[in-house]
Image (cartoon, rainbow, N blue to C red):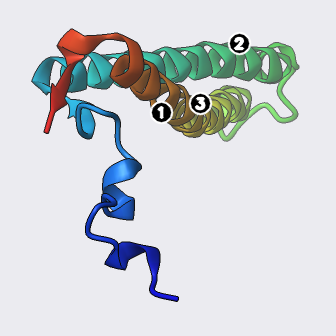
């Protein structure tokens, strides 16, 4: 029995996997909309990470600022260890939460834009090209 591709009256298998009008891709406007959606979503997640980091860092650093200094300091120099510890807590919390927001934003927006691309290809003809 010959393979089904040997039938001259039957279209090749790869041609039947496309739409009746041919394969569709996003045009420049569709790519621009998708790119702007991705960038805006990632920026929103990073901004949320910065805000969460600032709140958590200030909450964790406040006890260092309000605690009495353990020593008087050397000579007349004040003891700034509380200020340094509070700044380190704030910087660490902001860095970690910003990085977490960036990674979460990249993942969420990648998945979301994959579905937005599929919707645009199916339902918005002015955002797509036909080959």
Residue 77 seen in the figure = no
Q: Identify the residue under disc 1.
A: 114
Name the spot of residue 5 as percent of width and height, x first.
Answer: 37, 74
Query: Could you say whether the residue bearing mark 3 is in a helix, strand or loop?
Result: helix
Rendered image quadrant of residue 71:
top right
Could you tell me which residue is drawn at 54 percent across and 26 percent down? 112
Query: Could you say whether the residue bearing mark 2 is in a helix, strand or loop?
Result: helix
Q: Residue 9: which disc? A: none
18 relative to 112, above or below:
below
Q: Identify the residue under disc 2.
A: 55
98 relative to 29, above or below:
below
Q: Identify the residue under disc 3.
A: 108
Could you tell me which residue is drawn at 83 percent across and 27 percent down? 69
- Between the C-alphas of marks 3 and 2, the distance is 23 Å
Dot 2 crowding, Cα within 10 Å, few <14, some 14–19, many 20+: some
7 relative to 117, above or below:
below
List the single residue furthest toward the bottom.
1
- Is 73 positioned to the left or the right of 68 in the image? left
Could you tell me which residue is drawn at 70 percent across and 32 percent down? 89
Residue 52 seen in the figure = yes
- Nearest the viewer among 71 and 110 is 110
Name the spot of residue 97 as percent of width and height, x first.
Answer: 64, 31
- Between the C-alphas of marks 1 and 2, the distance is 33 Å
- Between the C-alphas of marks 1 and 3, the distance is 10 Å
Name the spot of residue 14 as percent of width and height, x first.
Answer: 35, 60
- Is 8 positioned to the left or the right of 62 in the image? left
- The quarter of the rendered structure image containing the C terminus is top left
The disc, 1 or 3, on the residue closer to the chain's N-terminal end is: 3
Dot 1 crowding, Cα within 10 Å, few <14, some 14–19, many 20+: few
The disc, 1 or 2, on the residue closer to the chain's N-terminal end is: 2
């Amino acid at each position: 029995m010959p393979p089904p591709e040997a039938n001259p009256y039957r279209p090749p298998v790869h041609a039947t996997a496309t739409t009746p009008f041919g394969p569709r891709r996003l045009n420049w406007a569709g790519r621009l909309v998708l790119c702007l959606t991705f960038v805006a979503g990632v920026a929103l997640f990073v901004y949320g990470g910065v805000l969460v980091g600032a709140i958590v860092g200030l909450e964790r650093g406040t006890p260092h600022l309000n605690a009495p200094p353990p020593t008087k300091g050397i000579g007349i120099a004040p003891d700034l260890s509380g200020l340094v510890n509070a700044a380190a807590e704030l910087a660490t919390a902001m860095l970690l939460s910003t990085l977490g927001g960036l990674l979460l934003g990249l993942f969420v927006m990648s998945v979301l834009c994959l579905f937005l691309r599929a919707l645009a290809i199916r339902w918005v003809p002015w955002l797509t090209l036909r080959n």
